Image (tube, grey):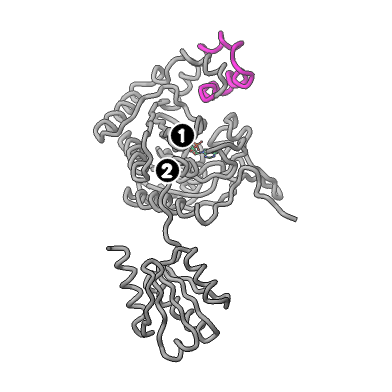
């Protein structure tokens, strides 16, 4: 009986995982440079957490949750990271420890979407969240950090879009404006959009249905409903981006699919990776009301979530890294035990080493060393163990020498150091 992975969920194998690790390391390094600390939360949460934060009438909660009953609890695999981070922030009273908290996370998320290139049922997000800073400068810094990250990863042709939804009242005013505009056009809307017209008209702006796109083409701008304070905040965002030289475009149709956003919204996409309409690499914005909504104090917050699969599709292919620098080929049991000790000594020096413990022929071991792309093959049999030496075969230079066991580690270190700094 053979099993297949669940639809829309992927195995990540050697050969691909190196690029994942490169991306994750770049993200973590940059997040730490900006003063963020990592938080890890469970992948299962109460379903109600997501209903309350993301919103009952959003695509994600309405159609895409992986939920399950366990005893009297209704749980869900997290569809995104922010709700869990806010729950943890409130549960552990992090607001009492520092006025401003900068947190980052990384991990799998789950949404039952129709799989296609760049869209999966299990996918991975890396995100940053700032709690306790209400100003637009930190929103601008989030955007600029993302541009820097993508540039470091070699992704070009970035399109940065920003918008403002205003505070909770402005959002309500805008919903009314949009409703008033769309009601006379209701007959031309898709059936789903007609339902949303009553309970959540903002979602109609996210619709990919051509009828909805046409009906909303001349809709009022979110900026029309802003209060003076919201406008000042948005101007502050644009001024800070200008000051840093961060390229961006204002898109007043950008509303994003989750209900918790207030004021700043942003999205960065790239035309690399043949992602088509799934080309948003990251989305984010401010969610000033969410901490209070989830039972905490009135703490403003802002953040983003990067879709790692999409970034990997947009990243240029990097040359494959050498898997093992040193392959150790022992012949016979005394040599195997010596090989295990040599392997441990090399790894203690930070050198990648693999011991062949299969007991096959020297020829088959050399074939494996070459297939792995190893620079050196260390060969030892009974004779070498007795005489206290090891045969050192350089697979790049095609040379072979005998090295005294006592000098072996030093010799290997020198050869590999010369390879790195020719
Ligand atoms: P969201 O949490 O919906 O704001 O999405 C943030 C980012 O996560 C998007 O810009 C995508 O890069 C990524 N993303 C969202 N849903 C999926 C999915 N089903 N498959 C792959 N990536 C996704």
On screen, 177 above or below 314?
Answer: above
Query: Majority secondary structure of the magenta segment?
Result: helix
Element class at badge 1: strand
Q: What stretch of residues is rendered in magenta?
A: 180-207
Residue 302: x and y in percent read: 40, 38
Residue at 39% x, 49% y is 27
Residue 422 image-quadrant placement: bottom left
Could you say which disc has been placed on residue 64 in the image? none
Circle 1 residues within 10 Å: few <14, some 14–19, many ≥20: many
Tell me if the residue at label 2 has its CB under 8 Å from ligand 1.
Answer: no
For this view, does 119 lie left or right of residue 320?
A: right
Q: Is residue 343 above or below residue 191?
A: below
Q: Could you say which is closer to the camera, residue 17 or residue 172?
A: 17
Judged from this view, the residue extending furthest toward the front is 398
Q: Nearer the viewer, residue 264 or 232?
A: 264
Number of the front mark, 2 or 1: 2
Residue at the image position 59 percent from the left and 12 percent from the top? 188
Return the residue at label 1: 280
Q: Among all residues in the image, which is located at the extreme top? A: 184
Name the foreground residue: 24 vs 420.
420
Residue at 36% over, 43% down: 154
Q: Is residue 22 left or right of residue 259?
A: left
Q: Say which mark, if any, is on residue 315.
A: 2
Q: Residue furthest left?
A: 243
Q: Is mark 1 within 8 Å of ligand 1?
A: yes
């Amino acid at each position: 009986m053979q099993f297949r992975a669940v639809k829309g969920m992927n195995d990540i194998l050697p050969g691909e995982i190196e690029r994942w690790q490169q991306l994750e390391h770049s993200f973590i390094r940059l997040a730490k440079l900006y003063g963020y600390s990592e938080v890890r939360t469970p992948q299962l949460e109460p379903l109600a957490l997501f209903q309350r934060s993301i919103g009952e009438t959003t695509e994600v909660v309405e159609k895409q949750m992986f939920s399950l009953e366990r005893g009297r609890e209704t749980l869900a695999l997290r569809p995104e990271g922010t709700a869990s981070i806010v729950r943890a922030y409130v549960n552990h009273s992090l607001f009492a420890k520092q006025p401003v908290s900068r947190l980052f996370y990384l991990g799998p998320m789950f949404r039952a979407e129709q799989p296609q290139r760049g869209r999966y049922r299990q996918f991975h997000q890396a995100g940053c969240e700032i709690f306790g800073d209400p100003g637009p400068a930190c929103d601008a810094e989030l955007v600029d950090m993302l541009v820097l990250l993508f540039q470091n990863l070699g992704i070009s042709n970035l399109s940065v879009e920003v918008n403002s939804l205003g505070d909770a009242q402005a959002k309500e005013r805008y919903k009314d404006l949009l409703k008033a505009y769309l009601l006379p056009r209701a007959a031309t809307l898709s059936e789903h959009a007609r339902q949303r017209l009553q309970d959540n008209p903002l979602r109609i702006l996210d619709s990919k249905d051509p009828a909805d796109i046409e009906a909303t083409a001349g809709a009022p701008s979110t900026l029309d409903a802003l209060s003076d304070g919201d406008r000042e905040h948005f101007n502050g965002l644009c001024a800070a981006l200008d000051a840093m030289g961060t390229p961006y475009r204002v898109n007043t149709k950008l509303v994003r699919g989750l209900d918790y956003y207030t004021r700043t919204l942003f999205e960065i996409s790239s035309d690399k990776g043949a992602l088509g309409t799934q080309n948003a690499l990251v989305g984010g914005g401010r969610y000033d009301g969410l901490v209070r909504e989830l039972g905490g104090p009135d703490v403003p917050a802002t953040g983003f979530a990067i879709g790692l699969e999409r970034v990997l599709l947009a990243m240029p292919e990097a040359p494959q890294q050498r898997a093992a620098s040193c392959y150790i080929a022992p012949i016979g049991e005394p040599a195997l035990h010596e090989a295990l000790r040599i392997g441990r000594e090399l790894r203690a020096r930070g050198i990648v080493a693999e011991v062949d413990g299969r007991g096959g022929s020297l020829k088959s071991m050399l074939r494996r060393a070459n297939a792995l792309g190893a620079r050196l093959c260390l060969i030892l049999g009974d004779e070498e163990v007795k005489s206290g030496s090891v045969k050192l075969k350089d697979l790049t230079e095609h040379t072979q020498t005998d090295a005294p066991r006592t000098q072996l580690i030093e010799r290997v270190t020198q050869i590999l150091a010369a390879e790195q700094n020719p």
